[in-house]
Image: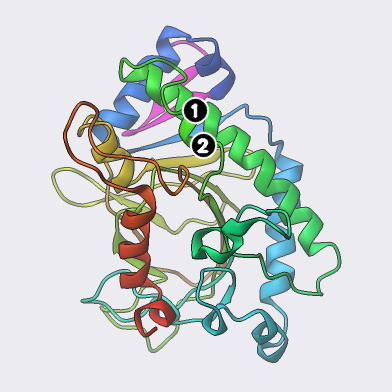
Amino acid sequence: MNEHSETSGLIPRIDLQALRTSDPAALDAMRVAATDVGFATVYNTALPPERVAQVIETYRAFFKLPEAEKAATDMATTGSNRGWGRSGAEQVDPDANPDYKQVFDCGVTLPEDDPRLADPFYAPNIWPGTPAGFRQTIESYYTDACAVGLEVLRGVAEAIGQRRDAFDAAFDAPMALLRGNYYPERPASAGARDFGIATHTDYGCLTLLATDGTPGLEVRKRGGGWIPVTAAPGAFVINFGEMLQFWSDGKVIATPHRVIGSTAERISVPLFFNPARETNVAPPGSDQVISAGDHLAKRYNETYLHLAKA
C-alpha cells in the first residue's frame, strides 16, 4: 500500500482521488473491500468535512424539535418513505424489537408534472419548515453525495474487472434515498432484543455513510464477532447491499452490520445509492429478470412498519 490507500485492521481505507485515477494500491484495497470485507472507508472526496458537519448538525436540529412539530412530516401518513420516521417505525430484524432510532428520509426531487411522482420510489419529498434552511442544505447535499456515490461505484466496477462505467447508465434516475439517523442514548430499559438498528444487510446497491464520529456501527466478521467502524465527518463508511451482490454475480458481498447504541447519542447520514426502478439487476448473462424496484419494494415492505400494514 502507498500513501493513497491503507488498511486499518480489516477495513480498507481508500483515497477516492487515487481510486479515480486507477491507482493500483487503491484498486487493490477496493477489491478487498468489495469481494472480501464488504466495507471500507473513503476519504479525499468532493465533500469536505465542514460541509458534512453542517448536514449532520442540520439533522440534529430537526431531531431535537418537539415530537408534535416533527409529526407534521410523519412518513406514516404517506405510502412512501419520505419524511420523518418516529422511534419504532422500522424493524429490520423480525426476531428483534422495532429499532429505537428516529429517521428522516428524502429522495430525488422531480418536476411537479413528472408522472413518476405517483411511484412511491420517486414520491414528492416532504420538507419541514424548521430548522431554517433544512431543505436547501439537505437537497444540495443529496445531489453532491450522489455524485460521490457514482465515483465510488466506478471504482468498484474497475476493481472487480468491469469497465469503470459499467453501472453508469442505470443511475440516470436513481432511487437514491438520503437518510438522517438519530440514535439517542441507549434506553435504560433496553434488553437483548433492542437495537438502534438490528443486524441486517443493506437492501440496495451502495451505501455512502457520513457520521458525527461517535462510535456505534459494528460489522460482522466472517468467522464471528464484530468490528467497530468509525469515520469522522469528511470521511465516509461505504458498504455494499444485496442488490449489488446479485448484480455482480456474487463478486461483491453484502456484509451484516448493526448499531446497538451506547451512553452517547449519535447522528449518521447514509445515502442508499440505488439505480433506476426498471433496472435489471440480475447477474449479467443470466436469463433472470430482477427489477431493482421490485427488490426494494419487497424489502421496504418487510421493514417499514407503516408500509407493511398498508
Would you place residue 113 above or below residue 243 in this image?
below
Location of residue 167 in the rendering, given as x and y in whole percent from the top left corner: 43, 28
Would you place residue 243 above or below residue 151 in this image?
below
Location of residue 122 in the rendering, given as x and y in whole percent from the top left corner: 56, 58
Dividing the picture into quarters, in which one does residue 21 lie? top right
Judge whether residue 13 is colored magenta. yes
Q: Residues within 10 Å of mark 1 (few under 14, many from 20)?
A: some
Image point 33% across, 78% down: which residue? Answer: 194
Residue type for callout 1: Asp
Residue found at the very far left of the displayed protein: 223
Looking at the image, how many numbered discs can be counted on the residues?
A: 2
Secondary structure under the numbered disc 1 in the rendered image: helix
Would you place residue 291 above or below residue 11 in this image?
below
Q: What stretch of residues is rendered in magenta? A: 2-15
Label 1 with label 2: CB-CB less than 8 Å = yes
Location of residue 291 in the rendering, given as x and y in whole percent from the top left corner: 33, 48
In this rendering, would 305 be left or right of 247? right
Residue 190 visible somewhere in the drawing: yes
In this rendering, would 263 be left or right of 133? left
Foreground residue, 67 or 228? Answer: 67
The residue wearing badge 2 is 171
Query: Quadrant of the image for the N terminus?
Result: top left
Chief SS of the magenta region: strand
In this rendering, would 263 be left or right of 55? left
